Amino acid sequence: MSVPELLPVLSEAEIQKRVTDLGRQISADYRGEPLVLIGVLKGAFVFMADLVRRLEIPVEIEFIRTSSYGKEDTSSGEVRLLHELGTDIRDKHALIVEDILDTGLTIEKLISCLAAYHPRSIRVCACIDKTERRINDLRADYACFPVDEGFLVGYGLDYGEKYRYLPAIYAIKNLTSEDPK
Ligand code: IMP
Ligand code: MG
């Protein structure tokens, strides 16, 4: 059985610097406006925690969980909200915070679910905007890093629930169908 290998892609310092810049940009764009950040569990929990601490404006925080990505490394397209939103977002700006935008299916479905709560606007903030497998014309309104390809782990991103705790981001290589996911 092959051993999965982790190749460094983004260092902790690079990520922190970029999150700081993004925090400033989001603060400038929403200053004086009611803003709710909606983190998508589980992957966004690390990015969300860092991002909110770089904001210079007050925000409300909410988390949502979608139906699982399953055990595969590609999106099933079956996306459901697993619970109702606990915060009233009507007439507030909603900013969805995601770990990674891949095919775009999750975010597309999430946007239509959240629209039912009548927010003033809905935008998307992703730590990684990975375009290789995008199947719709969605783009992140805010993204820390555009990435072309590869399966990434660390900084909240997992492969079969592993590697989320790593403070940097790596590409995982040498995966075979026998590797536990
Ligand atoms: P999408 O619906 O294909 O855009 O799926 C996005 C979700 O798939 C992300 O929130 C991640 O949970 C997962 N995902 C997609 N690509 C990767 C990756 O490279 N590493 C880890 N998780 C990924
Ligand atoms: Mg996710």
Image (tube, helix red, strand yellow):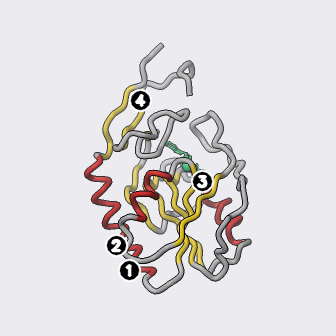
- Compared with 35, 63 (above or below) is above
Is residue 123 something that shows in the picture?
A: no
Residue that mark 1 sits on: 28
x and y percentages locating residue 119 in the rendered image: 64, 77
Mark before the other along the chain sequence, 3 or 4: 3
Q: Which residue is mark 4?
A: 173
Residue at 37% across, 39% down: 170
Give the mark nearest the N terminus, 1 or 3.
1
Is label 1 or label 3 in front? 1
Q: Nearer the viewer, mark 2 or mark 3?
A: 2
**Residue type for callout 2:** Arg
Outermost residue to the top: 1
Q: Which mark is residue 135?
A: 3
| Between discs 1 and 4, the one toward the N terminus | 1
Type of amino acid under label 3: Ile
User: Mark 1 and 2 residues: CB-CB less than 8 Å, in contact?
Assistant: yes
Q: Which residue is mark 2?
A: 24
Q: Mark 4 Cα within 10 Å, few/some/many (few <14, many 20+)?
A: some
Q: CA distance from mark 3 to mark 4?
A: 24 Å
Badge nearest the viewer, 3 or 4: 4
Q: Amino acid at mark 1?
A: Ala
Q: Which one is in front, 133 or 168?
A: 168
Secondary structure of residue under mark 4: strand
